[in-house]
Structure formats: structure tokens, C-alpha cells
Image (cartoon, grey):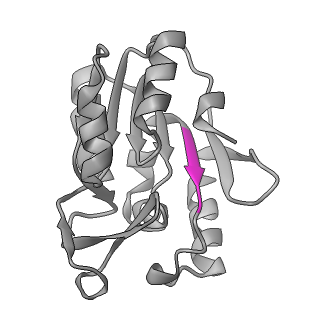
Amino acid sequence: MSSFDLKYNPDEVIVSVGFFAAPEIKYLYKKTPPKYLEAYDPRPDVYNEYLKLRVPNFEPILMGVLGEPREAYLNLKKASSTLCLPHKSKQPVETVSLTYVTNTIVKKYGIIDRLLMNCEGSEIDIIQKTPSKILGYYKYILVSFHLFAELLNISDKDYKDCLDKLSLTHTGELRHKTRFWWEFRRNG
């Protein structure tokens, strides 16, 4: 699955956590601009590419998103990155909680349609530490699980616990042949 395959309505409010690269955003805005897109990414190079885009209703934010804000460091590997505890890397990253992000956008727009997460292992922390009530604000959650993020020691139990937690508020569907791409649709 590619973010180029993402289908959404033009009136949607979308939160992206490491999901999009600049060319994908440019493509999406040519095809169907969303009502609002807030994109979080802790990588300075990605953020700088975001700033070059001249698209409406797009807010790039140079921050990492975690389940709760805390000291974190960026571990860069090729085109990928992982937020780690301080002893694993030397590049500090400012972080914010998904709860804060969600509450801020809900105050402004009243609803959030999609949460898109492709954040190299941080999705486990985000889901585990974000209250179910907050996750329930999103109509759709598309998440790529990264169990291979060896720096984070993610277990199969962590992965299963995240699926179980999301199933309290959403119905999940595996979107790719591997078990890593899941789309969750809010119940009710």
C-alpha cells in the first residue's frame, strides 16, 4: 500500500504522523485537496521539503508525536527514522502527545476524519498511551506497524495489545498482505 493510493473526501480534516513525503502531498492536493492537513514529522529534511510546498490548508510541524510528550531522540536510518530514548541517539527532537494534537484540532474543526501513522515504531507508544476516548475522535485510523524497529524492543504482545485497544472504538481491516498496514473505521 502506498500513500498515493489513499482515498478521502475533499471536506476531510486529516492528521499525519510521519505518513507523507512532500511529493505525495503535492500529488494529493492536485487530485483532491483536503479541508485541512496537519503533518507532523521530526526529520528536518522532510519538514524543509514541506515548507517548499505552496498548498492551502496545510500545516507542517517539525515535531515527533508520542503517546505522551517526553525527551526523545531521532535515530536516522536511510529514508526512515525512529524516535528513541536519549541513550540511543544524539539528535534531540521536540515531541507532543496525540492527545494534545487531537484536542487542539477538535476545538478548531469539531471533528477529525483521519489519523495516518507511519512513524517507524512510535505508533505502538502512541496507541498504548493515548486514551481510547481520544482515539475515538477519528473516523478512520490508518496505521503501519513497524515491529522490526529493533531500537524500541517492540514485541508481538505490544502489537496485539494495540490492535485490541483500537478494536474497542474501531473495526479493523488488514489493508496489505503483510500484517503491518491496518485501516480502522470508527464503530457506530
For the question of whether residue 168 can be seen, the reply is no
The relative height of residue 44 versus residue 121 in the rendered view (above or below) is above
- Give residue 23's position: percent from left, percent from top: 46, 30
The relative height of residue 55 versus residue 155 in the rendered view (above or below) is above
Q: Which residue: 60% across, 72% down?
A: 147
Q: Nearer the viewer, residue 45 or 158?
A: 45
Question: From the viewer's perspective, is 75 left or right of 181?
Answer: left
The image quarter in which residue 157 lies: bottom right
Q: Which residue: 68% across, 44% down?
A: 171
Question: From the viewer's perspective, is 85 left or right of 8?
Answer: left
Q: Residue furthest right?
A: 177
The quarter of the picture where the C terminus appears is top right
Q: Is residue 143 magenta?
A: yes
Q: Residue furthest front?
A: 78
Most common SS among magenta residues: strand
- Give residue 85's position: percent from left, percent from top: 29, 80
Q: Nearer the viewer, residue 91 or 177?
A: 91
For the question of whether residue 94 can be seen, the reply is yes
Q: Is residue 44 magenta?
A: no
**Numbered disc total:** 0
- Give residue 28's position: percent from left, percent from top: 50, 20
| Magenta span of residues | 141-145
Q: Which residue: 60% across, 74% down?
A: 148
- Give residue 36's position: percent from left, percent from top: 34, 20
The relative height of residue 84 versus residue 19 in the rendered view (above or below) is below
